[in-house]
Image (spheres, rainbow, N blue to C red):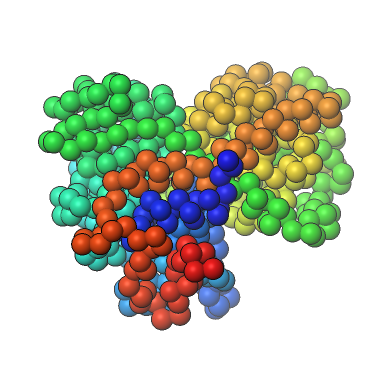
Amino acid sequence: MAWTKARLEDVAQTRLGGARLIVVANREPFVHRYRDGEVEWIRPAGGLTAALDPVMQACGGTWVAHGSGDADVEVCDERGRVGVPPDDPSYVLRRVWLSKDDEEGYYYGFANSTLWPLCHQVYCRPTFDPAHWETYRRVNQTFAEAVLEEAQDGPALVFVQDYHFALLPRLLKAARPDLVVAQFWHIPWPNPETFLVCPWAKDLLDGMLGNDLLGFQTQYHCNNFLDTVDRALECRIDWEKFAITRGGHETTVRPFPISVDPDLAREYLGDDWEPRAAAFRKKHRLADRALLVGVDRVDYTKGIPERLRAVDRLLAKHPELKETFHFLQVGAPSRTHLAAYRDLADEVQDLAEEINWRHGTDRWRPVVFLNEHHGQEDITLLYRMAAGCVVSSLHDGMNLVAKEFVAAREDDRGVLVLSQFTGAAKELTDAVLVNPFDVDELAAGLRTALTMPAEDQERRMRRLRARVADNNIYRWAGMLLSDVGKLVPEPAGSPKPACPTPPAEPTAPHLTRESFIPALRLANG
Ligand code: F6P
């Protein structure tokens, strides 16, 4: 049976019973900001929020996140709560306010200058700064307090996201052993030699072993995690069950490859996508040339300079391709407070200019670099317009751009050029798989995308689409919930209800109980 939003709603009802679902992720799914004196909201760039928002819309509950928008506080109640999505609320966003020092040490520091490069291995040497570590610990404690407040005294399943919160599971379990705690690690887990150079490796591992269930993108990352724990900590490892017991508590470790909601593409495209595509072509002077697109946060793990060098190589080797295509890179600014990210944006800009100078003509510039945030509507439009989408990450846990591109191609056309070093490459084997470190191979991949016959495109794309349709985001969440949901205790003194007992009324004044828990709407017809 296929996984759909409705099926996930059912699973959430039966598995969660009366328990609250609390998701914790550093990034919030909606950011409120000021534009020209008015408050507007946007969806931030990045796969995590795009993937989890449909799950929360299906299950209801509370998402605890850092409130990062300059108008965030404006729309919240006194506890930092607001109903989202802003245009049709179905769950609660609880914002946690962090100081600049907190952000500096925890987010830019330990999360993104230590754990991010450490887990992606090389490309940028991790920093190991005791002050960052202290702030990371403090902010994990701050989030623990917010989660405990949201859980009130009842049963709850806390679903922690990513490397920002390695210590949170242990803190939660210490305070409330009855909470069921699961974590999904969205980025790779490296081999033990790499991870164990971190001076605080043991504390991080111990924190993660507070989880009942720990999910990674691939079996390989699970293997690496078990190997790392085996080398570093006193514990018992059951290699059959893939479970670790430490201090009497068992953590099960499993792969759950994350995905997208394939039906959203149609929604984002709308009925007017063709005139929008024509307007986009006119605005960027693309004429009717073929488009190769890249869509990324400007991050050094994504292999953006590598793909531009491949464009350069392609044009040098095949001058007959001049004026036949554009390479269009959407680069959402990301973590620009860090020098490594600012330097990368400059490098990409310089490379684009250099290639345009070398190969461009009066009426044609091969590379178009749009270094700004684009909404999902525009991005999906680009996917639909493209001859090919290029994902050339040097190392990536999954990469949801690859899956979003496939989901957008209802016409069964377009070619996905995909780095073999992404989690997505394990599933999307009908893509043109490339080694992004090999400039000639990547250039050849781009040429394949520009020249593949229509029937080959269709054959590959149909298989890719079937894969993404089956392994969609509802399957990901459903499998996770099914695994961990059996640990959720029955509410004290009562059998598990047939339909969920609603949590207390949310305090955000404009939220109704119905808008808070869609599962209730379903159960009550
Ligand atoms: O892949 C890691 C990750 O943190 C994702 O979870 C998220 O989608 C992306 O990076 C965005 O990063 P940030 O929240 O730092 O902008």
Asked whether, in this view, residue 88 is left or right of residue 462, the answer is: left
Answer left or right for 208 relative to 513.
left
Residue 214 in percent (x, y) is at: 33, 38
Q: Position of residue 368 (x, y in %)?
A: 71, 44
At 35% from the left and 66% from the top, the residue drawn is 501
Seen at 27% across and 55% down, the residue is 490
Dividing the image into 4 quarters, which one contains the C terminus?
A: bottom right
- Most foreground residue, 152 or 452: 152
Q: Is residue 313 shown to the viewer in this render?
A: no
Q: Nearer the viewer, residue 9 or 451?
A: 9
Q: Residue at x 53, y 50 (%)?
A: 7
Residue 465, picture quadrant: top right
Count numbered badges in the picture. Answer: 0
Q: Quadrant of the N terminus?
A: top right
Q: Is residue 55 left or right of residue 419?
A: left
Q: Is residue 163 above or below residue 447?
A: below
Compared to 153, does 235 lie above or below?
above
Name the residue located 39 percent from the left edge and 60 percent from the top edge: 498
What is the quadrant of residue 256 in the picture?
top left
Residue 418's quadrant in the figure? top right
Q: Is residue 428 visible?
A: yes
Q: Is residue 408 above or below residue 358?
A: below
Residue 258 % position (x, y)? 49, 40
3 and 331: which is toward the camera = 3
Name the residue nearer the viewer: 49 or 473: 473
The image shows residue 212 at horizontal and vertical percentages of 27, 41
From the viewer's perspective, tell me whether residue 152 is left or right of residue 327.
left
